[in-house]
Image: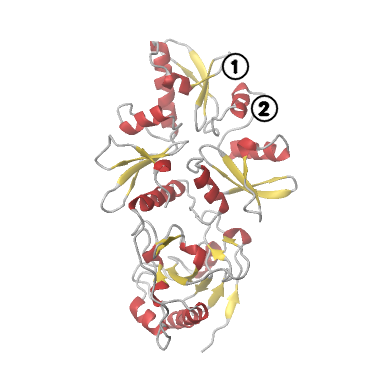
Amino acid sequence: MDYSIIQYPALPSAYTALKPGRRIDMVVMHSTGGVKTGDLWTLTGRDRRHLVSIHYYITKLGEIYQLVQDKDISWHAGISFWQGENDVNRFSIGIELENLNNGVDPYPQAQQDAVLWLVRNKVQQYKIPRSRLVRHAQVALPPGRKSDPRGFPWETFVGKVYADIQPGPPPPPSSPPPASTVLRTALIDASYRRVRHVYHPDWALHQFAVKERIGPPLLPLFRFKAEGRDWVAEVYGMDALCSPVGNWNDIRRLSQLPDGELKHNFRNEVYRVLGASYHSDWAFHQYADRNPIGVPLSESFRLTLGSGETYTAQIFSLDTLISPYGQWDVIFPLSNLLDAPDLEPRDAELRDTMLNRQYQRIGAKYHPEWAMHQAANKLGLGAPLSHQEQIEMGVQDYVAQSYGRDVAYSPVGDWGVVKLLNDLNVA
């Protein structure tokens, strides 16, 4: 039986468009954890909270939808590794099955017949060896991050796919990724997940952010208008990035933009999405324009010390600006107090009060006796962006916390050891 393939294109912003001839030598099978209506909405890039896509989607009724063309890269596998290579999106076709992925929801025969027909065709079309027809659970990093397609009769299915098909060449030697690579990808993935975003290693924006080491993300992707066109943007601890829609490799940094409409609109939008307002005549914001202190994390606020002295301050991702109340032209950053070897009691109180406000902003508490908080101050990591979160790795788990400049992490139980994501080797 032959099947008709229903064309249901994903939005251009939900996949990487390429010219024909892309290398394809792998098929990755998924199940959605949802039902058709919501699945198609999400997998075509219309759910801005979850930017994912897929080449093919097969319903329980056996309908086959094509959302992304084979020649293009869909964003289906995320952080992944197989047979010595990472980012399997680059050379694989992704196929999603409508299923709740709870191990109980059935895969009806009509659905199994349709996926068998499709996969057999793709295996023969691209000469895919048996070792490179895989489940998402097999390739996702860190191991155990994904379970799909849970409950699917895998071994029986693979046997039917390769019945009467000549075996391909033997697979290349398989070696697991280095532990540092697994940890690095887990920390990156967690930093995006904390802000309800998804890390896509094949996105130009994400590749740029990781390569340039501009800190953890603060927000999901958003859009704005400037110079008569639409732009997509992301905000990181050290800078904000934008690209014209459809021209993903044209990446601009807010800190390096010349004065003009693009900088004006982008800067205003960055302040807005972060809950602040930009005022070109404010001394704090003029200082922020001239100095690399990151992006605003709060509006300006007033604080009073025990002595009765009052200050105005504003938290930025890499530093916090402070002025004696009413003396707007007198500005000093919190980092000056952190770097000073000996402080007068008043300055020490101001320093500790501001550090507490930085952690209170995220609903946490500053612990000067904690090694991670001490390291953040000593290394100048900037303001905390997240609570501490446990990263489960199996043999050794870690606790991680995002700061403006980097992600700090410690092995669970060995709290005196604090390391940084940017110091992990790139594999």
* Residue 48 percent across, percent down from the top left: 56, 54
Residue 279 is at least partly visible in this image: yes
Query: Compared to 338, does 110 lie above or below?
Result: below
Q: Which residue is mark 2?
A: 280
Q: Is residue 228 left or right of residue 15?
A: right
Q: Residue furthest right?
A: 228
Q: Position of residue 236 (x, y in %)?
A: 52, 41
Residue 98 appears in the picture as rendered: no
Q: Is residue 87 above or below residue 319?
A: below
Say above or below: 200 vs 286: below
Dot 1: element? loop
Question: Residue 85 at x, y = what percent?
Answer: 43, 62
> Viewed as shown, does residue 137 lie left or right of 268?
left
Q: Residues within 10 Å of mark 1 (few under 14, many from 20)?
A: some
Residue at image position (50%, 55%) is 200
Residue with the mark numbered 1 = 328
Amino acid carrying mark 2 in the image: Ser
Query: Residue visible at 25% across and 52% down?
Result: 395
